Image (cartoon, rainbow, N blue to C red):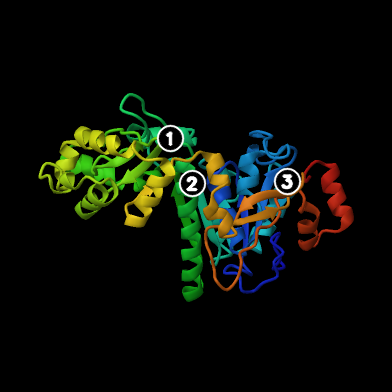
Amino acid sequence: MTERSANDSGSSDLPLAGFTVVSLEQAVAAPLATRHLADLGARVIKVERVGDGDFARAYDSAVLGQAAHFVWLNRGKESFAVDLKADDGIAAVKSLIAGSDVFLQNLAPGAAERLGLGADELRADHRELVVVNMSGYGTDGPMRDRKAYDLLVQSETGLCSITGTPETAVKTGIPTADIAAGMYALTSIQAALLRRHRTGVGATIDVSMFDATAEWLGYPMYLQMYQDRQVPRMGLAHTSIAPYDKYPTADGEILIGVQNDRGWRILTADVLGLPELAEDPRYATNVERVRRRDEVDALVGEATKQFASDVLDDKLAAAGVPAARLRDVRGLIEHPQLATRDRWREVETPAGPIRAVRPPMNFRDVELPMGAVPALGAQTDVLLAELGLTAEQVAGLRAAGIVG
């Protein structure tokens, strides 16, 4: 298979230039992993169903008539639309995989094996292949075959139990379980390719949303295991630090997070003009401040509301006290930190160009590409031609509904 990508960057300086990834993916977790691989220069071939493709294409029509999730997660990829129930369709996918470095799938447990796309079968003649199986709850255990959407995994892992207010448990505002699994798949693939460089042997990797999210819950798990203490839901506050919350200002509010006793003294004496609090033994240590959290929050809040938000923000920054403005998503889009650092680019989509934030991995010697979001099946004919099929054969497959 030729070393070409929808990124079309042409740069051998890209970290993953020359690597080809075939992904039988949908929704969030797997597409996030492969989009970052595409950002890093890999050629990513996205296998989709004829007709409707990845079901995330239809989540909404928010972005020029296209789904927000889909345009976020699928730039820089090539779309190959195929019927996996047809023998010729499976044969084409197997041929694509045979010429690739990585195969990733997030089908239901056992589905890849039933299609003849199990890791053992694929790697029997291609020991160098890296195969990644993504799932909700893992390859065994009592919940192996359960549906595993992001909300459900957040709930089962206990993430919802520590997120929200004292009165109400909530899920996180982004698909945390999906993103966690996608990032561990990404790092696992890169690690496997590095090991293959040394040994010549690929890998079979299993990544589950449940395991990834459980890893991110390490801090509350240790508190529970060794202190028998459930981390309470505290909104914006922190269970182990005070002051650490939002506080009123004369025209709004601001977040302040003081993580050590020196910071407390600077906040009270230098910023708020309350030197008596800085030395008060009732509040001198974080342990004492946490014990008297309500008092501390009331004292800090009474002082902060004497300042306008902009004035207090500047004073806190000048003093080195950790603080932030509580912004909404519009505030992020308009954030000067993105604008002044040139973080915005345009990405092509079938409906026209859209704005997108540059990848968070910043290589100083090369800018990572941000390839086009593919229309369903946009590269099917090209990929089949690379596999050696003639135009007449491709037309026959299309007439039979095997490719689209």
Judged left or right of residue 282, residue 87 is right
Q: Residue at x 46, y 51 (%)?
A: 206
* Position of the C terminus by quadrant: top right
Direction left: furthest residue: 281
Residue 259 vs 198, above or below: the answer is above
Q: Position of residue 228 (x, y in %)?
A: 18, 37
Q: Residue at x 47, y 75 (%)?
A: 198
Within 10 angstroms of label 2, few (less than 14), some, or many (20 or more) residues?
many
Judged left or right of residue 115, residue 251 is left
Q: Position of residue 243 (x, y in %)?
A: 26, 42
**Disc marking residue 251:** 1
Q: Position of residue 152 (x, y in %)?
A: 44, 32
Amino acid at pointer 2: Ile
Chain-order first, disc 3 or disc 2: 3
Residue picked out by circle 3: 82
Q: Is residue 118 visible?
A: no
> Does dot 3 land on a helix, a strand or a loop?
strand
Residue picked out by circle 2: 179
Foreground: 298 or 260?
A: 298
Foreground: 35 or 389?
A: 35
Q: Quadrant of residue 50?
A: top right
* Position of the N terminus by quadrant: bottom right
Q: Quadrant of residue 106?
A: top right
